[in-house]
Amino acid sequence: MHPRETHVAVGIVATAPEAQGRGVARAMLQPVIDAAIARGLPVRLVSSLMNLDSFSLYSRLGFVAHTIYQDLTFTVPATGLAGAAPLEARRVRRVTEVAEAVRLAAFERELQGIERERDYVFFLRNQIGAWRVWVLEDASGALEGFIVASHHPSCVMLGPGVARDEAGAAALLWSALDAMRGLSPVFLVPNAAAQLVQTCYGWGARNIELHAAQTLGTMVAARGISFPTFLPETG
């Protein structure tokens, strides 16, 4: 679990096969839920829609699924992504300054209603050397989106991130993916972002899973395009 200012996040929950069906997962989750309720915060997680036992567990505990994501992957060609880059990709750049965390957190809170500045400090410090953070800015330098990329061989994945619209999301994805040449990253795209999904298919992406964002407690109305990760980000 990761307590944050606006919510409590839950990462991956797993039990040994011989312990399944004995209420172990519920017993592990209940203290997390109790702690969130005591603070007046919702609990948020991203879970597999292909694991019905997991989905049922969260549903019984009161979680409500609100956004479906398509898990996509493909091997990025060694020569880079084929075709022309999205027009807005020219305004995407990599940032490394820890001070950028404040701006990223404020932007995410504006669009998604959640805040996790410590997460972005963690990524930008990049102590293991595997994280890259990309931002999209408008002509005046104002933030229009960002995405985090893990290049670590144990978890080649994009997210978290958020963009104001699908065009910006495509530009961020293009830039982050093109920098992963020869790798096979996994990234989650909202199912409702139909044009963005088709764009990813055009790059060669294929579906490998489905995930759902779920919340226990008050759900904040979100705007824009989010790129979640099902891993907890900060240590």
Image: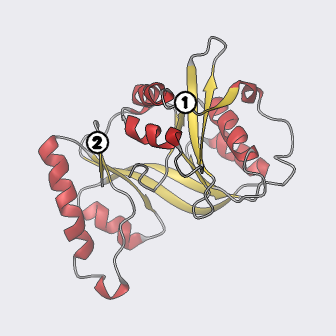
Counting from the top left corner in percent of width and height, residue 173 is at 67, 41
Secondary-structure class at tag 1: loop
- Depicted 16 relative to depicted 36: above or below: below
Q: Is residue 116 visible?
A: no
Counting from the top left corner in percent of width and height, residue 125 is at 50, 40
Of circles 1 and 2, which is in front?
1
Q: Which residue, as the protein is rendered here, is positioned at the far top?
A: 140
Residue identified by numbered label 2: 7
Within the image, what quadrant is residue 148 found in? top right
Residue sitting at 72 percent across and 26 percent down?
Answer: 88
Residue sitting at 27 percent across and 71 percent down?
Answer: 25
Q: Which residue, as the protein is rendered here, is positioned at the far left?
A: 38
Counting from the top left corner in percent of width and height, residue 36 is at 19, 48
Residue sitting at 49 percent across and 57 percent down?
Answer: 211
Within the image, what quadrant is residue 193 found in? top right
Counting from the top left corner in percent of width and height, residue 168 is at 64, 30
Residue identified by numbered label 1: 97
Q: Are marks 1 and 2 in contact (CB under 8 Å)?
A: no
Going by the numbered disc 2, the residue's amino acid type is His
- Depicted 19 relative to depicted 1: above or below: below
Q: Which residue is at the front of the view, 12 or 95?
A: 95
> Is residue 10 shown left or right of residue 122?
left
Q: Earlier in the sequence, mark 1 or mark 2?
A: 2
Question: Mark number for residue 230?
Answer: none
- Depicted 177 relative to depicted 145: above or below: below
Going by the numbered disc 1, the residue's amino acid type is Glu
